[in-house]
Image (cartoon, coloured by chain):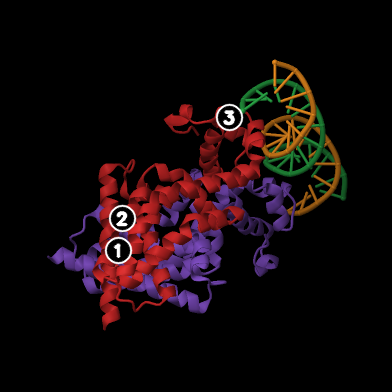
Chain colours: A purple, B red, C orange, D green
Amino acid sequence: MNMDDSAQTQSLPERLLSTAIDVFGRKGLEGASTRAIAAAAGTTMSMITYHHGGKEGLYLAAARSIAEQIGERITPAFAAAARIEAADDAAAALAQVVALVDEFANVMVRPESAAWARFIVREQMEPTPAFDILYGGVMGRLIDHISALVVRATGGRLGPTEARLRTIAIVGQALVFRFARATVLRATGWASIDAEETAAIRGVVRAHTTAILADARAGAET
Amino acid sequence: MNMDDSAQTQSLPERLLSTAIDVFGRKGLEGASTRAIAAAAGTTMSMITYHHGGKEGLYLAAARSIAEQIGERITPAFAAAARIEAADDAAAALAQVVALVDEFANVMVRPESAAWARFIVREQMEPTPAFDILYGGVMGRLIDHISALVVRATGGRLGPTEARLRTIAIVGQALVFRFARATVLRATGWASIDAEETAAIRGVVRAHTTAILADARAGAET
DNA sequence: GTCTATAGTCGGATAGAC
DNA sequence: GTCTATCCGACTATAGAC
């Protein structure tokens, strides 16, 4: 239930926020108690009311914080993607999709993504107003950019919906290693996912993404 | 919060069980209240104590019920898979993986899977003793069979761990359409997933699976 | 800004009527 | 087997001391 070591350097509102992402992700909005969150953040429940206006306010603030953190990490990649989208070079677009998905897989297997991944998956299953914050803030843009690149990478023959479905399926390959973590560990017999395991996962996702796009391009040309 | 129309024909313990899968899936073990489950099943809380020995007992019974239901549906497919595993025919194995994943995708997009899919995803994120029931009962066997077929389909060069990683990635493509449903609807602009949408999703998953396996086989032969 | 104390609600378990 | 009534603990929110 504890947070990272930087807890000491964070202000109390920040500490509450990062703890909230973790605990809400594990227990859900109704399953998490404000007492437990406050205790894990080293303070008392009434501080949640004071700083975030109550449990609901803390939950929405947690969603905003997640969208912000992810946005900071991938905005640079979006700029590169936008350049390649404009260039209309299929080979470059394919390479960029593979690079983006590879980076996405890398983020997904790293422990930092665990807390907000759990939070996001819960919002998928039972969306609340927080889902709008997450989708509008980062998820929608990710799909927009990758699917635009997928269209380019396959020679421009894919319709927008099919490109989006293919994008979701491709990204799903990387996502599964985060949200089905318990199954991944059981199936492989791994105790944890460290450097070696990460490399194996990323290699598989890269190989699959390349194979899918090359095949889709060949199919489009026929 | 209501269940299917067959509620009238089910016995009270069965009604409690199917309602519990739905509500636990949405709210989680701690988020769901026994009063809410009992009310949705048209009875009172004390019936949960009587029939399942309390909230925890009901939760484990829900997990057993899920494993049982899925097991009934896929055991026939396992028999066919086992025959092809023994035959060692790469083309047949490839076709069988595509067929299994296609059927899996079909189940994943249908509304019946929604309730137990949510339940399973929660167990992935925060495993409880119920995870052992789910993994041992059905998930492990699914991965065992598909990965054995993947080894055959790619010419027998894949190691067991890589075959399992590839299997998880392939299955992840189908899974994502279930557990990231909210994002799928937003990204495509669909209001729901009916016959036409299901066909589009299955087409994408089939195409990707075929492309991945064909490429892996070609790579293994080099 | 941060804490303690308290009020009011809702949760799960159980006893007992039918 | 099913329900009602009740107990007790845990929860959120809030008032007020420092």
Using the image as rendered, state which of residue A14 and residue A113 is in the foreground: A113
Mark nearer the N terminus (1 vs 3): 3
Query: Which residue is identified by label 3?
Result: B39
Q: CA distance from mark 1 to mark 2?
A: 9 Å
Q: CA distance from mark 3 to mark 2?
A: 37 Å
Query: Which residue is identified by label 2?
Result: B102
Q: Residue B219 at what x, y percent from top left?
A: 28, 79
Using the image as rendered, state which of residue B136 and residue B165 is in the foreground: B136
Q: Could you say which quadrant of the image residue A172 lies in?
A: bottom left
Query: Which residue is identified by label 1?
Result: B209
Mark nearer the N terminus (3 vs 2): 3
Above or below, B114 relative to A151: above
Mark nearer the N terminus (1 vs 2): 2
Using the image as rendered, state which of residue B21 and residue A212 is in the foreground: B21
Chain containing the residue with disc 1: B
Q: Residues within 10 Å of mark 1 (few under 14, many from 20)?
A: many
Q: Residues within 10 Å of mark 3 (few under 14, many from 20)?
A: some
Q: Report whether mark 3 lies on the same chain as mark 2.
A: yes
Chain containing the residue with disc 2: B
Chain containing the residue with disc 3: B
Residue shown at the point (62%, 38%) measured from the top left? B33
Left/right of residue A11 with respect to residue D7 in the rendered view = left
Contact (Cβ within 8 Å) of mark 1 with mark 3: no
Secondary structure beneath disc 2? helix
Q: Residue A43 at what x, y percent from top left?
A: 74, 55
Q: Is residue B133 visible?
A: yes
Amino acid beneath label 3: Ala
Identify the image quadrant of the C terminus of chain A.
Answer: bottom left
Amino acid beneath label 2: Asp
